[in-house]
Amino acid sequence: MPNRTRPVEKIAKATAKCSVEAAAYGKCVLADYNAVHKDMCVKEFMRLKDCVLVSEAQRRSHIGERGAGPPMVIAWRYGI
Amino acid sequence: MISLHTFRATSSRRCFAATFGVRTYASQTPGNPMLEIFNRKTKHLQKDRAARKVEESRKTDYLKDEVALRLCERLLDIKRDFPNVLDLGANSCNIARALTTPNLDIAAPEGTPTPPLAERISKLTCVDTSHALLHRDEELPFNKDINIHRDVISDLETLPYQPNTFDAVLSSLSIHWVNDLPALLEQVNTILKPDSPFIAAMFGGDTLFELRGSLQLADLERRGGVSPHVSPLVDVRDVGNLLNRAGFKMLTVDVEDIVVEFPDTFALMQDLQAMGESNAIMHREAGPLSRDVLLANEAIYRTMHMEDDAPGIPATFRMIYMIGWKEGGNQPQPLQRGSGELNLKDLLGGGDFQKP
């Protein structure tokens, strides 16, 4: 399959559309980067992740690519 | 930054602890105990896989080609013919390509064509562990301009050559994956003919410091712990000692930063993979990075390192160039300390700083 888009390229394109959320998350982590702990910025991260998932899903429906789409998105959302 | 020496120190400490309970004569452990940092097999597979995607692999040769050119520029300063040259860890023979490039000498007056360095080299032996990578560009035209001999060896750390074989050993962007660098340098010193140079470039110290830092923060925030994603590299300060220990004379070590701009961290990591430079640390985590960490990393990297209004993110590659000569012949020797009779101030002119 020569023209297959790699999964990482899909995330890259989707992430590019969420620069506001990405900046908010980045600022939150860097505000106290000497004492980062798990889920310190979970709220900001979830906002970023939701945005990426939405823009990924939009791309998918726009292109008309069907198949393993939605279940995979749900799996990622809940960390399965 | 973790330097190679720290690893050696911890390994010897561990040997000591093991023998502590039993009181016997102090004895040396047989062989040379060495902590393996990089997984050789993984590295070999990564290089092989990367090289089999020929187009992608060629596209990401920009860094290796550039460094090979800069390395060969250093060869211009040595006015000599080199009948027999070794390219240690040749990747896709990037050095051979640089050697066949005409007009390499930027110091030459404009309009005077300078011949490619290949004319001074009768035989170039390119050696690497990956067959696919080494033979990737076998059919390209530059192969006709230089007498290349390609050698695939199973392990870069044991060189199958006789002592006093080569008139020069070159190495570009390979030896940062070597576990036992002191032993390799000693071997290089052995296979060189007396009064011959070893010229090498390797990734050092602060290479990819941006990625190292942001991945650590992303790992911490998302998963609560850190796992090594960027290799430990040799620090510039250690290189002189390493060369000295291996018996090289007249050392020159210099550092150069190359900053490459990427559209995003995903592109950076994809390129590293296509170069065959992905993580090969022994005890790294199995499997790819999770999507969560990738996403967090992208956000943190951008916030930390992207300049305002810049189109992309910067990634720093720090090159350490080293030149060492094998002892021998009528090599110039440094004078005794304190034997100088001329004041450099008189020689170079200038003087004290002017008082304001």
Image (cartoon, coloured by chain):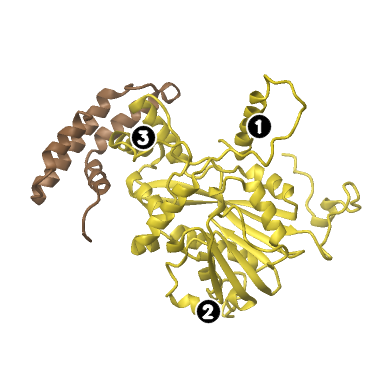
Q: Secondary structure at mark 1?
A: helix
Answer yes or no: do the residues labelled 2 and 3 have beta carbons within 8 Å? Answer: no
Q: Position of residue B23 (x, y in %)?
A: 73, 20
Among the 4 quarters of the image, the one containing residue B331: bottom right
Mark 2 vs mark 1: tell me if same chain.
Answer: yes
Q: Secondary structure at mark 2?
A: helix
Chain bearing tag 2 is B
Which shade is chain B? yellow
Mark 2–mark 3 distance (CA, rounded to whole Å): 47 Å
**Label 2 Cα crowd, 10 Å radius (few <14 / some 14-19 / many 20+):** some
Q: Secondary structure at mark 3?
A: helix
Which shade is chain A? brown
- For disc 2, the marked residue is B145
Name the residue located 61 percent from the left edge and 45 percent from the top edge: B180
For residue B248, which numbered disc appears in the image?
A: none
Closer-to-camera residue (B217/B174) = B174
Q: Is residue A44 above or below residue B91?
A: above
Mark 1–mark 3 distance (CA, rounded to whole Å): 38 Å
Amino acid type, mark 2: Asp
Q: Position of residue B292 (x, y in %)?
A: 29, 34
Q: Position of residue B195 (x, y in %)?
A: 76, 64
Chain bearing tag 3 is B
Front disc: 2 or 3: 2
- Sequence order check, earlier mark of 1 and 3: 1
Amino acid type, mark 1: Ser
- Regarding residue B243, the answer to whether it shows in the image is yes
Amino acid type, mark 3: Ile
- For disc 3, the marked residue is B300
For residue B12, which numbered disc appears in the image?
A: 1
Compared across the picture, whether A69 is left or right of B147 comes to: left
